Image (tube, rainbow, N blue to C red):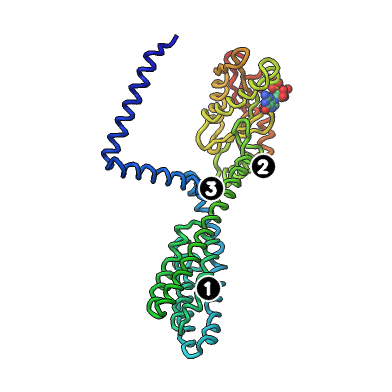
């Protein structure tokens, strides 16, 4: 029976300690009214952040890095197309200069051409070799800068060209959805615009132009933010799909298709470099009995334990995949027959030593393994697997709970208690 009096006394003491701590903090931060104002500001900030949460889709650090790399890859592919298209538009706007004011149209065309040519260095990876983001800043900065500078050379041209200059921010916001980076690219031509507007336009027009530009900038940032959120969601969905395709949902082992794809690549590499590669095909012994005696949940638990055991017994570069109900294949690159047999025996012994608490008792089970090492007799992955399957069949028919090497004179590891 709990001592309720003692519990109540402890609760009162805890409340008093918390109140003392709060009043100490209030004193430290100015206390009184200003402490209260600060607390409500913090609450308001928390509420605002909660409201904005759907817009601020956050990924963990690893996903954010992979997401950034995917954005960089798409930028890398788009820059050689969008960059020259933007450059062409900037140069063709020379006709607009002629229409607005033919006198300075020659010099404005020279400015446009010079800046576009300078920016063209960033269209491809060469000759600068900069990161794609740095090249994006160079291309956008010079091209938008050319529009700003040429418009400023015309009488009242900056105010007239403002919609065109502002519109150029939106394609950027679509291809670079990370708002800070987007802003970093927009900032240099925006500062140029502010400086030249202040210099060439009457004060009212300066205020008007800057206000409209700020409005367009805010909209472009909102586009980048929304685009970023949508693309992050698409990135996560794609990652989940890929994971589901690559892994068995029950055991976490590789799926059959992903295992085959990965193993075929390793097999080609092993053959090319003359390196050894071994596979072990394994199958739980009398698994039907496990299911019948302890139920399917216990059978599922045995499958998960088997995969965890394989992963624990193998090197980090080895991998295991599920190719059937209770049939698995371990692939061991850079592994010769002796090492593969030792690893397979380790798996067999570890599984045999397991005691799995399940409903209705403690489950013990064993596995049989057929090991095969890649050699000239195996033209492809299927041939290697066929031979490992043959060795597994021998292990089963030889009494189960054992390892057999797929070679006529290959060593066999009989189980101690089989
Ligand atoms: N619990 C569970 N059972 C499965 C799963 N996949 C296949 N099985 C069962 O695995 C059993 C396979 O039995 P068999 O192919 O007859 O082989 P076995 O009883 O292991 O006998 P041997 O392989 O000859 O030792 C069947 O009863 C399947 O229902 C699974 O994901 N979970």
User: How far apart, in angstroms, are the residues tagged by discs 3 and 1?
Assistant: 31 Å
Residue 99 found in image quarter: bottom right
User: In this orientation, which residue lies closer to the viewer: 250 or 383?
Assistant: 250
Q: Position of residue 124 (x, y in %)?
A: 51, 67
Q: Position of residue 246 (x, y in %)?
A: 62, 40
Mark 2 or mark 1: name the one nearer the start of the chain. 1
Mark 3 or mark 1: name the one nearer the start of the chain. 3
User: In this orientation, which residue lies closer to the viewer: 133 or 370?
Assistant: 133
The quadrant in which the N terminus is found is top left
Q: Where is residue 175 in the image (x, y as percent from the top left)?
A: 54, 61
User: In the figure, 14 relative to 55: above or below?
Assistant: above
Q: Is mark 1 on a helix, strand or loop?
A: helix
Which residue is at a point 53% across and 38% down the rendered structure image?
334
Q: Which of marks 2 and 1 is in front?
A: 1
User: How far apart, in angstroms, are the residues tagged by discs 2 and 3?
Assistant: 50 Å
Residues at discs 2 and 1 in contact (Cβ within 8 Å): no
Residue 258 found in image quarter: top right
User: How far apart, in angstroms, are the residues tagged by discs 2 and 1?
Assistant: 62 Å
The image's mark for residue 380 is 2
The reply to whether residue 393 is in sight is no
Kindly identify which residue carries mark 3.
54
Q: Is mark 3 on a helix, strand or loop?
A: loop
The image's mark for residue 163 is 1
């Amino acid at each position: 029976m709990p001592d309720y009096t003692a519990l109540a006394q402890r609760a009162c003491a805890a409340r008093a300690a918390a109140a003392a701590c709060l009043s100490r903090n209030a004193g430290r931060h100015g206390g009184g009214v200003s402490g209260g104002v600060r607390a409500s500001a913090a609450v308001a900030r928390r509420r605002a952040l909660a409201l904005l949460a759907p817009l601020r889709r956050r990924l963990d650090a690893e996903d954010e890095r992979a997401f950034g790399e995917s954005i960089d890859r798409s930028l890398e592919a788009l820059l050689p197309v969008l960059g020259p298209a933007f450059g062409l538009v900037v140069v063709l706007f020379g006709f607009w200069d002629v229409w607005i004011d033919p006198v300075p149209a020659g010099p404005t065309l020279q400015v446009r051409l010079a800046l576009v040519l300078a920016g063209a260095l960033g269209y491809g990876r060469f000759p600068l070799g900069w990161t794609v983001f740095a090249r994006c800043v160079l291309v956008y900065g010079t091209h938008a800068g050319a529009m700003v500078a040429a418009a400023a050379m015309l009488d009242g041209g900056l105010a007239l060209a403002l919609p065109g200059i502002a519109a150029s921010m939106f394609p950027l916001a679509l291809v670079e959805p990370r708002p800070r980076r987007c802003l970093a690219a927009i900032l240099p031509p925006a500062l140029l615009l502010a400086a030249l507007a202040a210099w060439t336009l009457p004060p009212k027009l300066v205020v008007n132009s800057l206000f409209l530009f700020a409005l367009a900038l805010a909209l472009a940032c909102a586009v980048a933010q929304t685009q970023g959120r949508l693309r992050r969601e698409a990135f996560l969905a794609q990652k989940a799909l890929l994971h589901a395709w690559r892994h068995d949902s029950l055991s976490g082992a590789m799926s059959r298709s992903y295992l085959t794809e990965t193993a075929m690549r390793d097999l080609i590499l092993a053959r090319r470099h003359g390196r050894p590669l071994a596979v072990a095909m394994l199958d739980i012994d009398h698994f039907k009995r496990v299911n019948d005696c302890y139920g399917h949940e216990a059978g599922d638990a045995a499958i998960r334990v088997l995969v965890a055991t394989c992963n624990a017994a193998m090197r980090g570069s080895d991998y295991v995949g599920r190719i059937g109900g209770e049939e698995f294949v371990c692939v061991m690159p850079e592994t010769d027959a002796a090492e593969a047999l030792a690893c397979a025996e380790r798996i067999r012994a570890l599984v045999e030593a397991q005691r799995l608490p399940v409903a209705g008792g403690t489950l013990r089970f064993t596995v049989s393994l057929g090991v095969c090492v890649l050699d000239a007799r195996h033209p492809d992955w299927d041939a290697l697997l066929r031979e490992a399957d043959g060795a597994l069949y021998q292990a089963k028919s030889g009494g189960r709970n054992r390892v057999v090497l797929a070679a006529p004179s290959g060593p066999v590891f009989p189980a101690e208690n089989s």
